[in-house]
Amino acid sequence: MSPEVDKAASTLDACRGAEAKIGDVQRLLLDPKPETLDRAMAQLAEVAATLHLLAKSGAQKWPPAAIESFHKIRQATRALGPQIEQASKFCRGWIQIRLGTGYTRQGSPVFVESEARSSFEG
């Protein structure tokens, strides 16, 4: 195979891999727990790194299938926004129930310093 064909194939593979990881993140966020959120964040970091490398390579050199895959990635990541927000709210609420003492006038949770610190550092 020529270097151009190899590069096109690796670009397509990278895009499809990113698509798959975003699908995994969507599934993980359906059941937000600290361990699933950690895995989702790791997956998103990998996707971001992949997309950064792909962007450096220049999209004008991508095969049509990779461009189509990239558009699917864009649509899926837009849909992730509300899912991430919901998971974040869930976790903040869970922490508030376990470690909170109330809310500020602005609606932010107030945590017991000593309990929160010992819980996360211990």
Image (tube, helix red, strand yellow):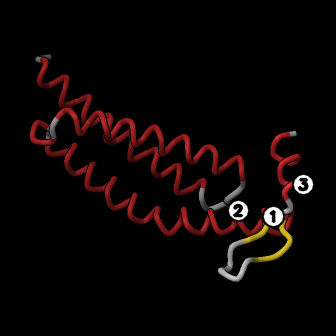
Q: In this rendering, would 64 be left or right of 120?
A: left
Image x and y of residue 121, in percent: 82, 41
Q: Mark 1: few, some, or many residues within 10 Å (few <14, many ≥20)? A: some
**Which residue in the structure is indicated by mark 1?**
111
Distance between the alpha carbons at the discs numbered 2 and 1: 14 Å
Q: Mark 2: few, some, or many residues within 10 Å (few <14, many ≥20)? A: some
Question: Mark 1–mark 3 contact, CB under 8 Å?
Answer: yes
Foreground pick, 116 / 64: 116
Instruction: Say which mark, if any, is on residue 91.
Output: 2
- Amino acid beneath label 1: Phe
Residue at image position (20%, 45%) is 65
For residue 101, which quarter of the picture?
bottom right
Instruction: Say which mark, if any, is on residue 115.
Output: 3
Distance between the alpha carbons at the discs numbered 2 and 3: 17 Å
Q: Nearer the viewer, mark 2 or mark 3?
A: 3
- Amino acid beneath label 3: Glu
Q: Secondary structure at mark 1?
A: strand
Residue at image position (15%, 42%) is 59
Q: Nearer the viewer, mark 2 or mark 1?
A: 1
